[in-house]
Image (cartoon, rainbow, N blue to C red):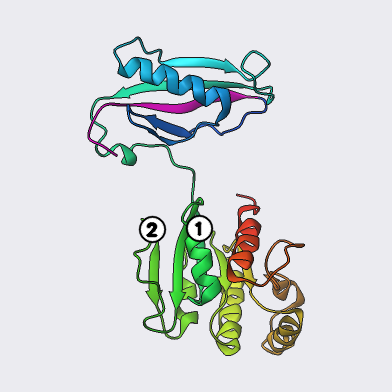
Amino acid sequence: MADSACILVTVGRTSGSVPREVGAWMTVTAEGISGTVGGGHLEFDAIARARTALDGGELAAEVRYPLGASLGQCCGGVVWLCFERVENAEGLATRLPRPPLRPLAVFGAGHVGVAIARIARDLPLALHWIDSRDGQFPAEPPAPGWRQEVCEPAADAVDELAAGSAVLIMSHNHAEDFDLVAACLKRQRQRKDLAFIGMIGSRTKWASFRQRLQARGFTEAERAQVVCPIGVPGVAGKQPAVIAVAVLAQILALPQ
């Protein structure tokens, strides 16, 4: 963002059906915008107000927008937008409201793991990406706050995952996948703090794993905590990006 004045627009309050949540933000400069507070006439008017203020006009601290016929939007709710002039936009990103991030642990930097990481950059997720092999992660740097880790054996990393993590198991071989599932179930038995345990694979693969986990002493209730296959139902296609979209939709649908 350029080192110049901008207008920070945030969703301060809402009532009823609205396009964005409280805390959603947009910055407006003379040259462009970043972020969004909901699009449509709501955003068009907010941009116009911000540009008028940048040109020396008056700036209201808060404006109420009924999203009905008068504004040309059919949401029907009400949005209160807050406007703030920022004289020096350098470092503004550290002040912007951010949605809470769900910790997501991905075991495996294969094709699907890479696709998940690429798409997850634009999602409210904090990625902890683990692989047991050196040189598997992409050359581009990870997103801010993300963690990449080479751990051999990979199952040793399970104990250090953030509480509340959603875990996706998609390593390069079935033996490692099995050890990871067992490690996750052991942690659940001790702490009950993983939000989701999912493994890529077929129903046949999971049937085999279920029998082996039973032989290891895991109960039916414990084994039922594992989701395999993963991804929202009805999404066809086995391309890595298709699988990644289906799996990330499943993660985003988890209760907070």
x and y, in percent, of residue 198 in the image? 63, 70
Callout 2 amino acid: Ala
Residue 71 sits above or below residue 151 on the image: above
**Quadrant housing residue 167:** bottom right
Q: Upstream in the sequence, badge 1 or badge 2? A: 1
**Quadrant housing residue 213:** bottom right
x and y, in percent, of residue 67 in the image? 63, 20
Q: Is residue 42 visible?
A: yes
Q: Is residue 160 visible?
A: no
Q: Is residue 184 left or right of residue 210?
A: left
Q: Which residue is tagged 1?
A: 120
Q: Is residue 103 left or right of residue 145?
A: right
Q: Main secondary structure of the magenta part?
A: strand
Circle 2 sits in a helix, a strand or a loop, which is it?
A: loop
Circle 1 sits in a helix, a strand or a loop, which is it?
A: helix
Which segment is the magenta one?
1-15
x and y, in percent, of residue 14 in the image? 58, 25
x and y, in percent, of residue 65 in the image? 56, 17
Front residue of this view, candidates 115 and 208: 115
Q: Contact, CB < 8 Å: mark 1 with mark 2? A: yes
Front residue of this view, candidates 183 and 241: 241
Residue 231 sits above or below residue 215 on the image: above
At horizontal 59% and vertical 76% (from top left) the residue drawn is 186
